[in-house]
Image (cartoon, rainbow, N blue to C red):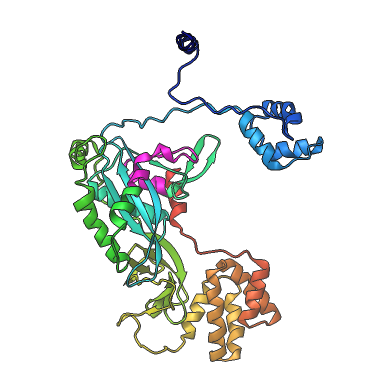
């Protein structure tokens, strides 16, 4: 009978208490500790400052006479602090076909067999509806690689989604002013050309673009693991084959059908490609050296002698370098030779320089360049010629190379000042212009023109 009564009493208590599949927590017998006299004070601090740290509680109680250690305070705060309310899992929006895409970058450390070890930047573009993926590999994750990766993906899909999500990368998002996102003008021009709208995710919210984040895990597990690559070119070739043979035929783990079946359904809804692709090349200025070369990415590339002393525009794609004259006429075209931290190389195909050896200095050409600097430069050059043709050419060439860091007007002002004091030496002119002018860099001029077009 006692056993039956015990069971009935236990059953009655169970009917009056909440049910849980979890075992009841272990409750220890209470005992006083060094923290017990301050328990009320700790509860009051947590109630007033919900985010207060255990370290701050320890500091406050130390000022009030607490003589124990920090660990006891930390464990007590952990027990008495109210647990945060659980947050429900975020649901992935079900975008319609051709509506949304996601894009991002991930670094891939690679040990090449015939090239130095490098961190390759992998670009990803994923269609949110069909989950079809496109990847591209670059040496750096800058604006020009970003645009080239998009153009490559658009060509592969023969279309693009109406919108694309991005994180806070600078090539897309310059900054935020309150709730307003300030986009990069050059990237906006690229987006307008293809007819899609960039969408910036919230700060530190990678879960807003889960498909592209998941795609990088697939890239590392399915493509990178178990493969070796001679160099970046070989890695790119293997990536193209992997996308065609492995990634596209893959069966979607949620929808349980091949990715290409969903893409065939989505393809008619994609934004069609424009008649001509966007020019994603980088445009920069470089001053042609006295021996007929321009520097780019650790190497020097030959330029016809007619361009020496001039700041010439370079148009740089992922594989080629185009050098134009001041009249924007194409002077020479080079295939880019990678430089992975090794010694500088001079790229000089036959026929660009009239002689393989050093050509004599043309003082008339130098004089014409000085005349283009501004008032006072011609008078300085006349005084410089009194030093003799050899010294005159040496100092004049070094002065002209200052245009890579200073504006022509600032150099002309420094030449006028040097002429007054008879300081006919390139070091003197460099010191004068450094003291009086602000250095500049020969930045890209395309971004400024693009901003004017958008306005």
Residue 38 location in percent, x, y? 75, 30
- Observer able to see residue 357: yes
As drawn, the residue found furthest toward the front would be 1
- Corner quadrant of residue 210: top left
**443 up-or-down from 124: above or below:** below
Q: Nearer the viewer, residue 121 or 338?
A: 121
Q: Horizontal and vertical percent for residue 73?
A: 69, 37
Relative horizontal placement of residue 293, taking residue 425 as reference (left or right): left
Q: Residue at x 37, y 30 (%)?
A: 91
The reply to whether residue 54 is visible in this rendering is: no
Residue beneath the point at 31% across and 55% down: 136
Q: Where residue 417 appears, x then y in whole percent?
A: 67, 74
Residue 252 position, x and y percent, is 24, 39
What count of labels does the image hold?
A: 0
In the picture, measured across the screen, residue 453 lies left or right of residue 379, that is left
Q: Is the magenta stretch mostly helix, strand or loop?
A: helix
What is the span of residues highlighted in magenta in the rendered image? 187-216
Above or below: residue 57 compared with residue 141: above
Name the one closer to the observer, 99 or 183: 99
Residue 199, magenta (yes or no): yes
In this rendering, is residue 282 above or below 180?
below
Asked if residue 218 lies left or right of residue 372, the reply is left
Q: In which quarter of the image is residue 208?
A: top left
38 is within the stretch colored magenta = no
Classify residue 214 as left or right of residue 30: left
């Amino acid at each position: 009978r006692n056993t039956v009564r015990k069971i009935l009493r236990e059953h009655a208590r169970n009917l009056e208490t909440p049910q849980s599949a979890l075992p009841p927590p272990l409750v220890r017998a209470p005992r006083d500790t060094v923290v017990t006299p301050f328990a009320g004070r700790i509860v009051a601090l947590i109630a007033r400052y919900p985010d207060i740290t255990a370290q701050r509680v320890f500091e406050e109680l130390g000022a009030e006479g607490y003589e124990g250690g920090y660990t006891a305070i930390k464990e007590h705060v952990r027990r008495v602090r109210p647990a945060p309310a659980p947050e429900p899992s975020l649901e992935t929006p079900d975008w319609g076909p051709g509506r949304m895409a996601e894009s991002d970058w991930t670094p891939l450390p690679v040990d090449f067999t015939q090239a130095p070890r490098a961190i390759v930047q992998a670009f990803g573009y994923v269609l949110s509806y069909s989950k079809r993926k496109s990847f591209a590999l670059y040496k750096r994750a800058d604006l020009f690689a970003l645009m080239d990766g998009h153009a490559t993906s658009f060509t592969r899909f023969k279309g693009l989604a109406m919108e694309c999500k991005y994180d806070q990368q600078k090539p897309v998002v310059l900054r935020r002013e309150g709730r307003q996102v300030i986009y990069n003008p050059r990237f906006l021009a690229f987006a307008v050309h293809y007819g899609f709208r960039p969408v910036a995710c919230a700060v530190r919210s990678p879960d807003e673009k889960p498909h592209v984040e998941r795609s990088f895990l697939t890239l590392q597990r399915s493509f990178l693991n178990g493969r070796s690559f001679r160099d970046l070119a070989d890695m790119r070739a293997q990536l193209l084959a992997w996308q065609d043979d492995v990634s596209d035929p893959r069966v979607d783990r949620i929808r349980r059908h091949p990715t290409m079946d969903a893409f065939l359904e989505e393809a008619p809804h994609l934004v069609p490609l424009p008649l001509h692709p966007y020019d994603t090349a980088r445009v920069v200025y470089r001053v042609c050296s006295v021996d007929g070369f321009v520097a780019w990415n650790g190497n020097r590339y030959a330029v016809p002698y007619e361009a020496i002393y001039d700041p010439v525009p370079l148009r740089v794609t992922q594989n080629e370098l185009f050098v134009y004259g001041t009249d924007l006429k194409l002077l020479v075209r080079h295939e880019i030779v990678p430089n992975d931290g090794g010694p500088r190389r001079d790229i000089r195909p036959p026929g660009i320089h009239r002689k393989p050896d050093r050509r004599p200095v043309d003082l008339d050409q130098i004089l014409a360049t000085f005349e283009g600097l501004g008032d006072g430069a011609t008078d300085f050059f006349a005084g410089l010629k009194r030093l003799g043709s050899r010294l005159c050419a040496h100092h004049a060439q070094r002065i002209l190379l200052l245009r890579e860091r200073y504006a022509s007007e600032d150099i002309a002002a420094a030449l006028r000042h040097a002429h007054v004091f008879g300081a006919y030496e390139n070091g003197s002119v460099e010191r004068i212009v450094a003291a009086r002018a602000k250095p500049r860099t020969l930045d890209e001029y395309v971004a400024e023109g693009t901003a004017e077009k958008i306005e």
